[in-house]
Amino acid sequence: MTLDSATADRWTSIVLFAVGLAMLVGGYTMDRLEIRQIHPASIPGLVPMILGLAMMLCAALLFVSARAAHTASKAHLANAASPSTATQHSDKTEPNSRRTTSNRDLFFAASYSVVYALALVGSLPFAQATAIYIAVFYTHFTWQSASTTTDHLKRVAFGIGFGIIGAYAIASLFQYGFLVRLP
Amino acid sequence: MDGLLALGQAFQQMATSQMLFHVMWATLLGIFVGSLPGLTATMGVALLTTLTYTLDRDAAITVLICMYVGAIYGGSRSAILLNIPGTPASAATALDGYPLAQSGRAGYAMALATAGSAIGTLVGILLLVMLAPPLAEAALNFGSFEFFWLAVFGIVISGQLTGGISPLKGYIAGLIGLMVAMIGSEGIHAHIRFNFDMPELNGGIGLIPAMVGAFGFAEVLTVMWRAKAKVVNATGERDRILPKLVDLWRYKFTIARSGVIGTLVGIIPGVGEDIGAWASYAAARRSSKERDEFGKGSYEGLTAAETGNSAVVPGALIPALTLAVPGSAPAAVLIAALFIHGVRPGPMIMIEQPDFIYSVAVMLIFATIAIAVFGLFLTRVFVLVLKVPREILMPLVFTLCVIGPYALTQRTFEIWVMVVFGLVGFVLRQMNYPMAPLVLGIILGALLDKSLRRGLTLSDGDLTPFFTRPISAVFVVIIVISIAIGIPAVRNAISRTLDRLLKREAERSADG
């Protein structure tokens, strides 16, 4: 399942419907501030209720359109099952190895960046955490393009140097330039 | 005449060596940001906002506007040389720019893009100075009923125009933005909503951390996911880096039309530069004598797209300044920056700070001159910029995404907000949900909420004034038509009826 597929849209519509329902219930059960004798039309939960209903409606429409698209694509695939069209189709597809590498890159970039932002920053001084982040990020993504041990060592050395210079430059800019108390 | 005088005074006040220094570095940085695929104008403006806290009002806004203008222009570089738009605004530029580069005319394509961008921005500035003051005056007549519909109009139009073939996803993105805006203390009774017992949420979700996440972190992930692009050979024997005046004169009507279209698209809330470029490109193609050349390396197509997207910048500032409703995503960040620097955008701006609109016009003129100078004389430097490896750039960008929002309030909670919006923004983008309506929803949520409840209180719960007051009625009609056009069955019925009418007309004229 890819993120821009009809199946993904169907699952999303269910999540969005639940979010809309939660918003509707949240708005309905919200304090109506009767004790403060406010006008009943100005209760804080009014707009959340409307937004919840609108989201539920949009989610239902998304589900219907995604189901129609799913049925249409199934019929299209059945038509395209003949050998000639199947060959054409496979020619246009991105090679599996490239896709796997891309997904691995994405997973690393996302998880490592989240770990840096939410765990490293705060538990280590900002400059040190950032130096580690930049150095590892650079080294990881250039590692595969190096073929010899010397190349690998060069990448690591550059990564460490770049990490330290980049981290201390940014930290100094914010600490001394903008007088920010760094995390 | 008064406007010209005010413009002259603003020019005199702003033309200091310190301001010109800010113009130069910020525009250069903007072009750099825009030309790198993955770094967008919104991200540049959002990150730079966190670096301008210590500057005075005029210097800070000048820096942000120069970044905005520079980044929109800079997007043309990678569109021409890599066939990857540096910003979404340059997608139409790539259609003709890349074929020109492939045929060894990259330098001339960039020269035309520079001229088109500069002229487009100037057309937009002219319309900004002409339209903003009367619009602000007209907006003084807006009450709660009108402001409610203005907010709904912004979300619906933005969702409609940025959602592509599926406006539904645009509407959903807008609703998500509005829901996010419901978090925290509401504006009438100061009641705290949806804080989930987390005191950090009492003040709501900050726009800057959310934008830095949705446009910064999400872009970092997108860039690291994508395959690397190759820079095309920049110049050929017949190439030149200065635009021929004869070419600009030949396309004078295209340039003027694209400038006006771009500015008008900019005025529409939350639509943005990419739509401005596509609308100008489509209009130029329809009326061109050389329409067969479009998409194969047409000078006219390239000029139209670049003029159109750059004209959106001043256009987007018109509603941002006069109604506090952004015309584009970077303009939304600019609104947040204006508040940070003590400017209150909205209908009162012409009463509280009447000179400010003219100061903004002068800032835009400075930025335009800067992109023209840098664009024409630093062509080869920008080609080198495109060769900066993503492994070097992206960790630095993400570090700024972390420390920038933190610097705003010095709370680590802002980093959490940035990360959540980054991850959610990335997933939504891959699922073809546009980001502009989401941003607009966050900005307009408070206005929509307060205006609806205030209006209902004024009318004692009666909904009639929402539909019967003249300006409200106009908004209602436009909104209903927009939504109806987005429904495929209605759209098909309209096109069938039009076809039938045209056929009948043709038969009648043939009989006659």
Image: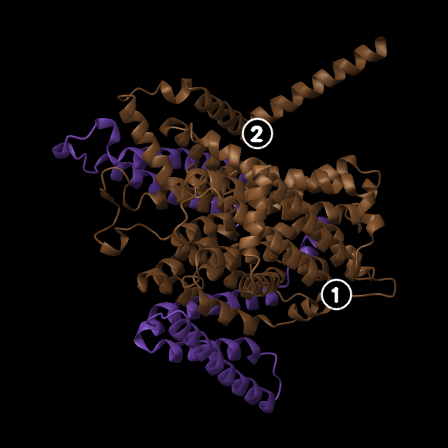
Q: Which residue is mark 1?
A: B232
Q: Residue at x 48, y 80 (%)?
A: A163
Residue B194: x %, y % from top left: 26, 46
Residue B390: where, in percent of width, then height? 58, 70
**Residue type beneath disc 1:** Val
Above or below, B296 against B221 in this view is above
Numbered tag placed on residue B488 in the rendering:
2
Q: What tint does the image give chain A?
A: purple
B211 relative position to B274: left or right: left
Point out the residue furthest to the right here. B238
Position of residue B448 in the picture relative to residue B97 (left or right): left
Residue A61 seen: yes
Q: CA distance from mark 1 to mark 2?
A: 41 Å
Q: Amino acid at mark 2?
A: Pro
Circle 1 packing at 10 Å, graded few (<14), some (14-19), many (20+), is some
Q: For residue B174, what is the image quadrant?
A: top left
Pointer 1 or 2: first along the chain: 1
Identify the residue at image location x=19%, y=30%: A38
